Amino acid sequence: MPTLIVKRPKRSFDRVRNYRIIINGEVIGTIANGAELRHPIDPGPHTLQAKIDWCGSPEVRIDAGDTDTTVIVQNRMSALQALIPLFPLWYISFSRGRYLRLELA
């Protein structure tokens, strides 16, 4: 059975908060800063999303084959943007569905 591997790089933004990982609408676990989550999945198409509080990532579709699938989840905020007081407010107010980003590795 293939495994979904979700990696979260170690960053300073959101460092003390965990992200919820959701497959097909069901929470499969949480991932801490700099950690990795492994979860077995059935082969075939799935939707994947990450959330933190009321913010999250857009849903992405993955097609699990016979091998493991690796996804990287990270905050869209760069260190420079985090220093600008209005930038975090913009993301949590108007762009909360794009606060996090999922990338296939």
Image: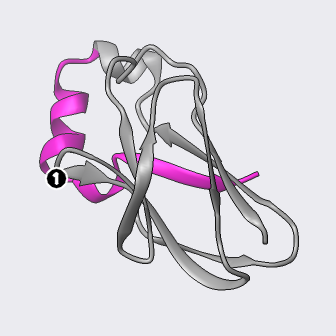
Residue visible at 24% across and 42% down in the picture: 91
Secondary structure at numbered mark 1: loop
| Residue 92 forms part of the magenta stretch | yes
- Picture quadrant where residue 35 is located: top right
Q: Residue furthest right?
A: 67
- Which residue is labeled 1 in the image? 94
Q: Is residue 67 left or right of residue 1?
A: right
Residue visible at 24% across and 49% down in the picture: 55
Q: Whole-percent x and y of residue 70?
A: 73, 53
Name the residue nearer the viewer: 96 or 15.
15
Name the residue nearer the viewer: 80 or 5.
5
Q: Whole-percent x and y of residue 66?
A: 87, 76
Q: Is residue 20 above or below residue 84?
A: below
| Residue 98 forms part of the magenta stretch | yes
Amino acid residing under circle 1: Phe
Q: Is residue 40 above or below residue 5?
A: below
Task: Please give the range of residues in magenta.
Answer: 84-105
Q: Is residue 73 above or below residue 82?
A: below
